[in-house]
Image (cartoon, helix red, strand yellow):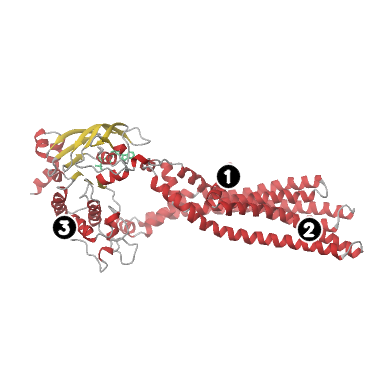
Amino acid sequence: MKLQLLRYCLDPIKIMIKFCKAHALLKIILLIVSAILAPLSLLLTEDLIDSVSELYKGNTGYNHVGLNLVLLLITILTISLCTSMEGYLNINFDRLLLKNWTPVVLNKYKQLKYSCFEDQETQDTIFQMSDNPSESIKNSFLNITQIGSSLLSLVLLNLVFAKVSVWLSVLCFVFTVPMLFLNYRAMTILDSLFYKQSAEDRKLGYLLGLLTTKSSLSELKLFGAVEYIVNQWGGIRSKVYKERVGANVKSQKLIFINTLCVMAWTVLIIITLVNYMYNGLITLGLFVALIGSLNSIISISEQVSWEYSEYSRNVLKTKYYKHFMSLPESEESADLKRERCFNSPEICFNDVYFSYPHSQKPILQGVSLTIRHNERIAIVGKNGAGKSTLIKLLCGLYQPDRGEITINGIALSNLSQHEISALFSVVFQDFMKYSLTVRENIALGNITKIHNDAAIDKALGQAEPMGFLKLTGKGLNTPLGKLEDDGIDLSGGEWQRITIARALFADSSFIILDEPTASLDPVAESELYQSLSLVIQEKGSIMISHRLASAKLADKIFVIDDGRICEEGNHDELIAKQGIYAEMFRAQAKWYDIIC
Ligand SMILES: Nc1ncnc2c1ncn2[C@@H]1O[C@H](COP(=O)(O)OP(=O)(O)OP(=O)(O)O)[C@@H](O)[C@H]1O
């Protein structure tokens, strides 16, 4: 089955020629030259020995011996030069890949369509791409070209036997095949186990992570569950170990059988050659050359099997790379690079339907709504109603299946990424915590203003009016997270405020907050709303929140149920309507009434 991997053998060659053209071609030429020179050196050895023997008998002069010696030395020197140049090329491949290949891959990451992240296969590919695949692609190129060169050498070495008899050459070749096969099988037994155990290896790593990470270890200790995880880890570990021992024994058995075959084959060939020499059918030189080829054939067969086993591991990354490069990119055609300025933008959802890629489940079903600039909007609804999905569509991360989203009458799909970024800045539920400086964490919202300290301070002040953040002497350049020794580790609520500051710093027409106060304590929540109500007067706001007290502040509330807008109005209107919103609000208020 693993032989099927040979169908990918041209891919690493094509990739390496694309990114390291001259070096890759030179490597192939050097390998071909080395493959030819190995049997040639044996033939020259034969000539040298025979000429020395003729010199001894007085049938030839020193010149002939000298010429053979010089030719042999030149060949040995050339082989050694080829090997040194190959070493030099191998080092340069890394440099060239870093220079030519890495920017192409990074650019592809930049262009990837957001929907790519939905598909499990694609997620695997993206994960594999993060594990430096260029190293594996380079290695699979080296493996496959080395296999080609070794096979060429094998054929040429077998041809040396044809000097004695064609049958001997055929016999020699026929014996090479089981030798290759047994070596290959011995390697694949270990390889197959490696693949079979990869899920268990991942699980072992995960369990070990649970036992060595501060947060999980402290929770497991509290629950008294550490021993359970240790036992789980131990169970898998001993199963993996037993399987490895078993596979090694099987592999060693095959290697032993192979050694016996090689010995029988060697003895047979030597007896045949001795017999030929005894009958005067071959010279001493040819006898020595053929014995030399036996050694080379055995070691090359072992090398081919080893290289193939390495190739079968490395070439998988080439598969991932090809898949990665074929992933769809977000289209940003020339006419979409415009930067129009939308004064008083108005958002319209016109009968929008949407299902996630690879899913049949309808998430939004005929959503129609209008949001004007400077309006404070709240979107409320049960878990899974489709609130966050609506925001993702608004930011252009997904396209509606039916219906249209427009900004001032222009379809959102016709807006450039730049225009969309100028319209919306979003704080998602699963916001990012960047282990960068405070300055960078905030300026990522508008990187052009990264050195504008006054603007950064203003955004920070709006997001955290009480000044929770105690900066070190480095001020805004204080690192956050634990990547650096003097980094500050923030609480969930503190990180959330940094994220809100980032969104405010972006200076967009609308600020979108998906559960902005989920990690905040009640006092911080109330302070944030007061601060935001001032900021938001200058721009539109769309807030998703399960805390309905915050929805009271909104000019308009949209209630989503099962992907449909089922109610719309301000707090008083919706309470008067006695519908879903009123029911949700009463359910929450009841708890406070009980306590009060
Ligand atoms: N990437 C995805 N692929 C497939 N289905 C998804 C994906 N993301 C969300 N969903 C599904 O879409 C539905 C709506 O999800 P969404 O996150 O929009 O709900 P929500 O109203 O924001 O919920 P919550 O209040 O819990 O945050 C859910 O049933 C969810 O399982």
In the image, 92 versus 322, the foreground residue is 92
- Return the disc, 3 or 2, that comes first in the chain's sequence: 2
The residue identified by callout 2 is 44
Q: Is residue 306 visible?
A: no
Asked whether the residues under the numbered discs 3 and 2 touch, taking CB atoms below 8 Å apart as contact, a structural biologist would say no
How far apart in space, not on screen, are marks 1 and 3 (Cα)? 61 Å
Q: Is residue 165 visible?
A: yes
Element assignment for label 2: helix
Total number of numbered discs in the rendering: 3
Q: Image quadrant of ligand 1?
A: top left
Q: Quadrant of residue 78?
A: bottom right
Asked if residue 575 lies left or right of residue 6, the reply is left
In the image, 48 versus 263, the foreground residue is 48
Q: Residue furthest bottom?
A: 473
Q: What is the three-letter code of the residue carrying label 1?
A: Leu
The residue identified by callout 1 is 10
- Return the disc, 1 or 3, that comes first in the chain's sequence: 1
Element assignment for label 1: helix
Looking at the rendering, in which quadrant would you find the N terminus?
top right
- Return the disc, 1 or 2, that comes first in the chain's sequence: 1
Q: What is the three-letter code of the residue carrying label 2?
A: Leu
Asked whether the residues under the numbered discs 1 and 3 touch, taking CB atoms below 8 Å apart as contact, a structural biologist would say no
Q: Is residue 308 above or below residue 480?
A: above
Q: Within 10 angstroms of label 1, few (less than 14), some, or many (20 or more) residues?
A: few
Q: What is the three-letter code of the residue carrying label 3?
A: Pro
How far apart in space, not on screen, are marks 3 and 2 (Cα)? 87 Å
* Residue 539 screen position, x and y as percent: 18, 46
The residue identified by callout 3 is 465
Q: Residue at x 65, y 55 (%)?
A: 30
Q: Quadrant of residue 495?
A: bottom left
* Residue 158 screen position, x and y as percent: 75, 49
